Image (cartoon, rainbow, N blue to C red):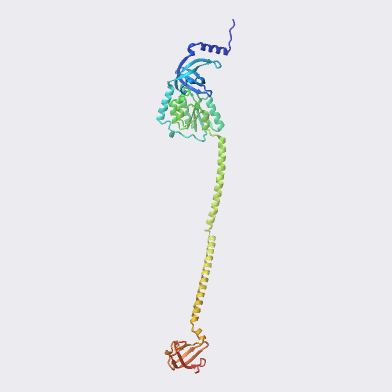
Amino acid sequence: MGRSIYSVGQINAYIKNMFTQDYLLGAVSVRGEVSNCKYHSSGHIYFTLKDEKAVLQAVMFAGNRGGLSFTLKEGQRVIVTGAVNIYERDGKYQLYAKQISRDGVGSLYEQFAALKKELSERGLFAEEYKQPIPRYIKTLGIVTADTGAAVRDIINISHRRNPYVELYLYPAKVQGEGAADTIVAGIEALERFGVDCMIVGRGGGSMEDLWAFNEEKVAQAIFDCSVPVISAVGHETDFTIADFVADLRAPTPSAAAELAVFEYQSFLAGLSEERRRLEVAMRRRLAFYEQELERRKLRVGRFRPDYQMAEKRLRLDACEDRLTGAMERKLREAVHRLELYAGRLKACSPLDRITGGYAFVTREDGNRLLSASEVSAGERLTLQLSDGIVRVQVTDTQTEEPFMGDGLCAGKVYDAANSQEG
């Protein structure tokens, strides 16, 4: 007897028909916690409902979003009303939501919020405890699963940016039972090894997938680590306790590698630019010191003995010129004054008067005769003329009619040459 052979599409269509005919699955309300929620650009909302035992994929199409009065977020406790059916292409059944209402906050989110508040109050998130990420590292530690996209992205980007940075991977379990312990062990091991920086993280996932990074022991290990830690857990919209404790949070593992590893080619270009600037600065500084050296040479040269002697000779010559000039001026002034005095003296000289027809009269004792009353008859006098001396004897004096003097006197004249009586 031959067996019937069906295609995959026929099987999925048959199962879909069974779901459609089931009255309970056609209109069902499911209580659960929202996880891995994504708002698609088409307007559809894809999410997962979960409880302690199982998960259920769900979708709300854009046309049914009128039945949603709030923004669906991770960890919310909700009641979803809709139909369970199969998506024939993928062979997956899921809940097609038509209405979603709140049912309190999910237990995982409550634990997350409580631990976040506690650790914040203990100061594990304080900025003053965060270490700066080294700009230029030689060794990079990685705590993540040894398989998956996260570690591949970190390795690829690190090698592309700087192939000389050494990478040390501690393969840790990043979800499930015991994951937090292996993450803590990886942090402590790489710290003892002495890496320059550390990336702790994993790829995206639901809240329960990322829960190991919300454990208190992981947060404490990151806080206690002496090596700067970059957290890179999940996608850009995912936040864990590890993100708040870490020295730096990266939105993705790829971004963490970008932040940790400096780009070698840019570094070389920057180094060349710095070398050029340093050379320019050195040339300027050298030119400045050369000019300063020349100035100091000139200043020091002034204290050389030959320079000092030459300078003193110049000063001595200048002084001599000033002294000579002063002496000549003084001499000219003295000569001028002497000429003035000589003129004045000449004007008062008896000799000038004698040449005008006058005589200088003295007694025999040589005293000057000033008045006719001083002479008596018979007294001998000496007359100084312009061309010689005449000796006379007074015969008479007369004081009544003065003429060009104090008085007149008459007497015998003696030749000055032979002393004969005139």
Residue 109 in view of the camera: yes
Q: Is residue 172 above or below residue 326?
A: above
Q: Which of the two residues, 259 or 226, is positioned nearer the viewer here? A: 259
Please tell me which residue is depicted at 44% across the width and 92% down the height of the picture: 397
Q: Which of the two residues, 202 or 7, is positioned nearer the viewer here? A: 7
Q: Which of the two residues, 374 or 113, is positioned nearer the viewer here? A: 374
Please tell me which residue is depicted at 53% across the width and 67% down the height of the picture: 321
Badge count = 0
Residue furthest to the top in view is 1
From the image, which quarter does the N terminus lie in? top right
Residue 293 screen position, x and y as percent: 54, 52
Residue 422 screen position, x and y as percent: 50, 94
Residue 258 screen position, x and y as percent: 53, 31
Q: Which of the two residues, 11 or 98, is positioned nearer the viewer here? A: 98
Please tell me which residue is depicted at 52% across the width and 73% down the height of the picture: 332
Q: Is residue 155 above or below residue 54?
A: below
Q: Is residue 17 above or below residue 147?
A: above
Residue 216 screen position, x and y as percent: 43, 26
Residue 188 in view of the camera: no
